[in-house]
Image (cartoon, rainbow, N blue to C red):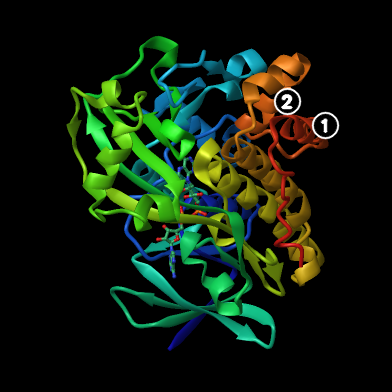
């Protein structure tokens, strides 16, 4: 078997892999990235939030996004179980900055744009190349074994192996590091519609979050380009997929549409243009984000319920933060666990702040009441929604939300304790 070397090997060419590899290559490191599929390939996760801007600015992808055909997103809107539409939440009103305009992306195209950008920055990308295993010597990762579809297996040795394999979670599975989030055990069922209702002007690209009757679930309504709208329902896994008379996805989908007066009129004149797709989406995270010679980013590190469209933010930000620890590691010739975990605590703090707001929604906290009681804090709530979560200021919200939970008779918030290894 042939053996070659690189400074860094990255497993997976999704948004987290392309971000971390681009930054490392820009610093002059030799980076080899292996992606098992050929891009463009389908992926879910289409709605961006404003603070993805900063990682894309850092890698240079932002300029390509500005010149892209993706639908511009300026706001988010909520529809109650009875079908009442809230005022749009314009990001610009909270933060008059260029980052307040973000995008709705067809992921096959966005991921390809980002991976091609990585290539243009010096990353050696191989598509159709599956990483079979991460090679360890003792507890230290020293490289990977890869099977390109058009050639024999080979080994690539590296100082750092980055697992960006998404929900394939190569290293989590190898070491049994996964901790499920006991409170967020959801599933999603979705399809795509052509000719569905679209707002106009600044509202055309708004994500609409639509609750279903009884608040058992919610729909995302994400307008994409080419007159396509992504419409999917998220609910507890067992409610959505298990405890049902019919297990047929189409039947379940329309049973949920029937419970969503906010969805029905929007798709009534539209034509379905894709299959029904299902994904289990239990939230989880690894007990640790790095070890000697290895590091996890994006979904390979942890996955959080997609209610606030935070997945791309977390993928891009983890890629950017991990890159800093790795660059420092190369400067000091230190690839130890403690060096590669340096970014983990602040990253998880940010993720936990989003999780808190996700749980508040599912637990039934009234955001309207909260903002009425504390109008001066509306900006901080919006900060969490746009992904500006890597700062302590937002923590002022939580004791006040604790108070409102008490008033509403909601049991105390249960913080996540996993991942504290
Ligand atoms: C139902 C649902 C809805 C969502 N909605 C949103 C949303 O609206 N907005 C948002 O921001 N996020 C959303 N997300 C989350 C988002 O999809 C993910 O967080 C994001 O794709 C993570 O990026 P990543 O680069 O870490 O992983 P991925 O994008 O999954 O990329 C991983 C890559 O690794 C490759 N790979 C895996 N194993 C190997 C291997 N052994 N060898 C080589 N390559 C390998 C895969 O082919 C893949 O291309 C949603 C998720 C779900 C489940």
28 relative to 167 in the view: left or right: right
Structural distance between the alpha carbons of marks 1 and 2: 9 Å
**Labels 1 & 2 near each other (Cβ < 8 A):** yes
Residue at image location 19% in from the left, 38% down from the top: 273
Numbered mark located on residue 171 in the image:
none
188 relative to 399 in the view: left or right: left
Q: How crowded is mark 2: few (under 14 residues within 10 Å), some or many (20 or more)?
A: some
Q: Residue 371 occupies which quadrant of the picture? A: top right
| Rendered view: 226 above or below 157 | above
Residue at image location 47% in from the left, 26% down from the top: 66
Quadrant containing the C terminus is bottom right
Q: Residue 394 occupies which quadrant of the picture? A: top right
**Disc 1 target residue:** 396
Residue at image location 40% in from the left, 20% down from the top: 83
Coordinates of residue 148 in the picture (x, y in percent):
35, 74
Whether the residue carrying mark 2 lies under 8 Å from ligand 1 is answered with: no
Quadrant containing the N terminus is bottom left
Coordinates of residue 69 in the picture (x, y in percent):
35, 28
Q: Is residue 221 visible?
A: yes
**Disc 2 target residue:** 380
166 relative to 27 in the view: left or right: left
Coordinates of residue 126 in the picture (x, y in percent):
40, 64
Coordinates of residue 202 in the picture (x, y in percent):
44, 13
Dot 2: element: helix
Front-lying residue, 378 or 165: 378
């Amino acid at each position: 078997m042939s053996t070659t070397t690189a400074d860094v090997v990255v497993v997976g060419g999704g948004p987290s892999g392309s971000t971390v590899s681009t930054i490392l290559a820009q610093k002059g490191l030799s980076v080899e990235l292996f992606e098992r599929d050929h891009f463009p390939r389908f992926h879910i996760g289409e709605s961006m939030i404003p603070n993805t801007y900063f990682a894309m600015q850092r890698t240079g992808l932002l300029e390509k996004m500005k010149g892209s055909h993706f639908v511009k997103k300026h706001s988010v809107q909520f529809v109650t179980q009875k079908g009442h539409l809230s005022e749009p939440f314009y990001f610009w009103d909270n933060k008059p900055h260029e980052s307040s305009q973000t995008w709705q992306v067809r992921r096959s195209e966005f991921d390809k744009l980002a991976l091609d950008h990585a290539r243009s920055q010096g990353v050696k990308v191989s598509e159709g190349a599956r990483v079979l295993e991460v090679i360890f010597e003792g507890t230290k990762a020293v490289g990977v074994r890869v099977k390109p579809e058009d050639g024999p297996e080979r080994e690539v040795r590296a100082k750092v192996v980055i697992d960006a394999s998404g929900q394939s979670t190569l290293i989590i599975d190898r070491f049994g590091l996964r901790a499920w989030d006991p409170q967020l055990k959801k599933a999603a069922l979705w399809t795509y519609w052509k000719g569905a209702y679209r707002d106009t002007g600044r509202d055309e690209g708004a994500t609409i979050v639509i609750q279903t009757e009884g608040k058992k679930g919610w729909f995302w309504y994400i307008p994409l380009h080419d007159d396509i709208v992504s419409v999917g329902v998220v609910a507890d896994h067992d409610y959505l997929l298990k405890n049902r008379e019919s297990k047929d996805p189409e039947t379940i989908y329309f049973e949920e549409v029937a419970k969503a007066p906010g969805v029905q009129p929007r798709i009534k004149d539209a034509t379905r243009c894709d299959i029904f797709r299902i994904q289990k989406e239990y939230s989880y995270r690894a007990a640790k984000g790095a070890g000697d010679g290895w590091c996890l980013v994006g979904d390979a590190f942890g996955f959080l319920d997609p209610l606030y469209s935070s997945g791309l933010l977390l993928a891009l930000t983890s890629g950017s933060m991990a890159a800093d620890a790795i660059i420092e590691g190369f400067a000091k010739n230190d690839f130890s666990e403690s060096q590669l975990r340096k970014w983990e605590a602040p990253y998880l703090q940010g993720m936990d702040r989003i999780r808190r707001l996700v749980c508040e929604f599912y637990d039934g906290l009234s955001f309207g009441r909260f903002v009425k009681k504390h109008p001066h804090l509306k900006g901080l709530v919006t900060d969490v929604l746009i992904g500006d979560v890597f700062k302590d200021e937002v923590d002022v919200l939580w004791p006040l939300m604790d108070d409102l939970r008490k008033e509403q008779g909601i049991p105390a918030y249960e913080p996540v304790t996993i991942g504290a290894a």
